[in-house]
Amino acid sequence: MHTASLVVAGIVAALHLYFLTLEMFLWEKPIGLRIFGNTPEKAAMSAVLAKNQGLYNGFLAAGLIWGIAHPELAVGVQLLRFFLGCVITAAVYGAATLSPRIFFVQCLPAVIGLALTFG
């Protein structure tokens, strides 16, 4: 596995840890309200859902970190391919149903990372 695929997978993992932080801890704070375009009332009503979504982003990050750190190269590659595929699937759905911006923020880096695992 090339260093580039590990770096890009690490970036995708870091992004998902950032999403976890925003959704689980900052959702109702000024930065979370601004980033997601929510009012305090809307954020309060959806906070439990956001925390759940944040937790899932944490699982994606954990899987990517597991793939990066796995001592057996072949297993690490398979883990990265699986979890990058999960990120891509979630991002395509999010881009189609929520905001096209998700394609560029989440999907594109994961697609690049996945492609690099085959290089």
Image (cartoon, rainbow, N blue to C red):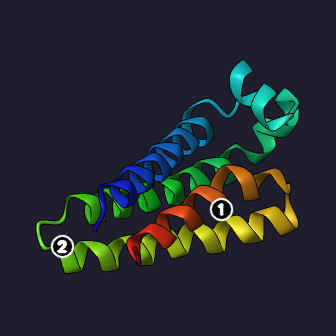
- Expressed as whole percent of the image width and height from the top left, the position of residue 9 reads 42, 56
* Residue depicted at 68% across the width and 49% down the height: 105
Frontmost residue, 103 versus 46: 103
Q: Residues within 10 Å of mark 1 (few under 14, many from 20)?
A: many
Q: How many marks?
A: 2
Res 29 visible: no
Quadrant where the N terminus is found in the figure: bottom left
Outermost residue to the top? 30
Residue assigned mark 1: 107
- Element at label 1: helix
- Element at label 2: helix
Horizontally, is 102 left or right of 1 in the view?
right
Instruction: Please tell me which of labels 1 and 2 falls first in the chain.
Output: 2
* Residue depicted at 85% across the width and 55% down the height: 99
Q: CA distance from mark 1 to mark 2?
A: 24 Å
Frontmost residue, 40 versus 99: 99
- Residue 116 sits above or below residue 22 on the image: below
Res 6 visible: yes
Residue assigned mark 2: 73
- Expressed as whole percent of the image width and height from the top left, the position of residue 87 reads 56, 66
* Residue depicted at 44% across the width and 71% down the height: 83
